Amino acid sequence: GAGVSQSPSNKVTEKGKDVELRCDPISGHTALYWYRQSLGQGLEFLIYFQGNSAPDKSGLPSDRFSAERTGGSVSTLTIQRTQQEDSAVYLCASSVFDSVTYEQYFGPGTRLTVT
Amino acid sequence: AQSVTQLGSHVSVSEGALVLLRCNYSSSVPPYLFWYVQYPNQGLQLLLKYTTGATLVKGINGFEAEFKKSETSFHLTKPSAHMSDAAEYFCAVRGGSARQLTFGSGTQLTVLP
């Protein structure tokens, strides 16, 4: 079956511009996660959605970052007024709401470059 | 809170040699432990996981890992390295009520012919 998909695969933007990154989770997966992978910080958790519950935003680095999930499926991560330190690969993952493992399936990522 | 330490950011082995990638974790609650592999320009793929039960866990591509609570370790091994194993490997932990994964800094594995 189809895995997690992300778009665009690459995004180059100018400092100060807003960007939107999209994630399509695996059908039927109720949990969705965003992570950021950068050279200096490794893999960092950003935000987590589970069903209709309020998202866990504890990993968002600043108020320039926000995310939404529409209809319990597609998610969009928005970065406003991008800065050079936002350059990273943004990974999305999804999982079945399982009480034991929450095994996460990752998408290929969006590589964001802020110039 | 949880944390993961991967010893050795780069490991090189010869083809056919034993692969050993080290992972130590810190968790205040019983952990769930994972190893992921990342090939260039791709997302993360799950190799194996430990939840409960048997402490020796077998995964895909001939990899296995052993959960040692007394040593707070979850080292990844493979008896015989293949060229196709060259990739970056991440150890991750999830504990308690946390749903997100906490990752180690990764180990880049190079396989020499």
Image (cartoon, coloured by chain):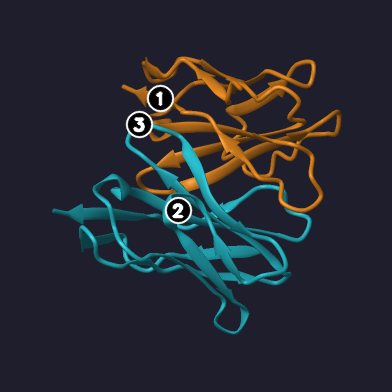
Chain colours: A orange, B cyan
Choose top left, top right, bottom left or bottom right for residue A58.
top right
SS for callout 3? loop
* Tags 3 and 1 on a common chain: no
Q: Which mark is residue B29?
A: none
x 26%, y 62%: residue:
B11
Q: Which mark is residue B90?
A: 2
Q: Amino acid at mark 3?
A: Asn
Left of B20 or right of it: where is A60?
right
SS for callout 2? strand
Q: Position of residue B65 (x, y in %)?
A: 51, 66
Asked if A78 appears above or below A106 in the picture, the reply is above
x 43%, y 48%: residue:
A42
Task: Pick whichever, B86 or B82, lies toward us.
Answer: B82
Left of A79 or right of it: where is A86?
left
Task: Pick whichever, A23 or A87, lies toward us.
Answer: A23
Q: Position of residue B24 (x, y in %)?
A: 50, 71
Asked if B14 appears above or below B71 in the picture, the reply is above
Task: Pick whichever, A21 or A106, lies toward us.
Answer: A106
> Mark 1 falls within which chain?
A
Q: CA distance from mark 3 to mark 1?
A: 13 Å
Q: Which mark is residue B41?
A: 3
Q: Which mark is residue A112?
A: 1
Number of other residues with Cα within 10 Å of mark 2, as a class: few under 14, some 14 to 19, many 20 or more: many
Q: Amino acid at mark 1?
A: Leu
